[in-house]
Amino acid sequence: MAKPTTFNGSKILIKVGDGAETETFAHPCLINTTRALQGSVTTVDSVVPDCDDPDAIAWTEREKDAISYTITGEGVMDASSIEEYIDFLESADAKNVQVVIADGDTTNGRVGTGAFHLTEFQVSGARKEKATASITLVSDGIVAWTAVT
């Protein structure tokens, strides 16, 4: 068995754009413990009967219809990010986001770039513990994937 090429989870970066004309992307400090990217596809189902035996059990055929991505991240709350993320949550506008899945290797990584809406922002804490934050971003349109450079 060949050993897989691995990298640390902290190398998965969620970079949020600043909205400037020449956009700069930065990984927010509040995503400092876990982060995840999930792609999902909706399908359209069609039940296709057997023409020779219409009473026989039919098969369901599926076609992919739409794709979307969800990003989640969490960490120890960065107090300087509170206002920015409340504003992002309350805004009707999406922000450009980059997802970097690589360990600096230019042959084995990908960067996804697209517009995302912040749909969940949670801050929580317990006595004698540091406050934590979590976010959920959902794609708004195409996420374009390129090789890491």
Image (tube, helix red, strand yellow):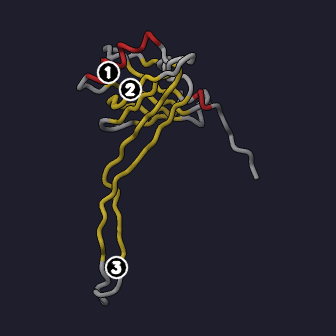
| Residue 115 in view, yes or no | no
Query: Do the residues under discs 3 and 2 have CB atoms within 8 angstroms?
Result: no
Q: In x, y percent, where is residue 120? A: 36, 30
Cα distance, mark 2 to mark 1? 9 Å
Q: How dense is the environment of label 3, judged by Cα within 10 Å: few (below 14), some, or many (20 and up)?
A: some
| Label whose residue precedes the other's in the sequence (2 or 1) | 1
Q: Residue at x 39, y 36 (%)?
A: 144
- Secondary-structure class at tag 3: loop
Query: Do the residues under discs 2 and 1 have CB atoms within 8 angstroms?
Result: yes
> Which residue appears farthest toward the front when viewing the image?
127
* Residue to which mark 1 is pinned: 88
The dot on residue 121 is 2
Residue type at tag 3: Ala
Cα distance, mark 1 to mark 3? 48 Å
| Label whose residue precedes the other's in the sequence (3 or 2) | 3
Q: How dense is the environment of label 1, judged by Cα within 10 Å: few (below 14), some, or many (20 and up)?
A: some
The dot on residue 58 is 3
Q: Residue at x 57, y 16 (%)?
A: 128
**Between 52 and 36, which is closer to the camera in this rendering?**
36
Q: Residue at x 23, y 26 (%)?
A: 92
Q: How dense is the environment of label 2, judged by Cα within 10 Å: few (below 14), some, or many (20 and up)?
A: some
Residue type at tag 1: Phe
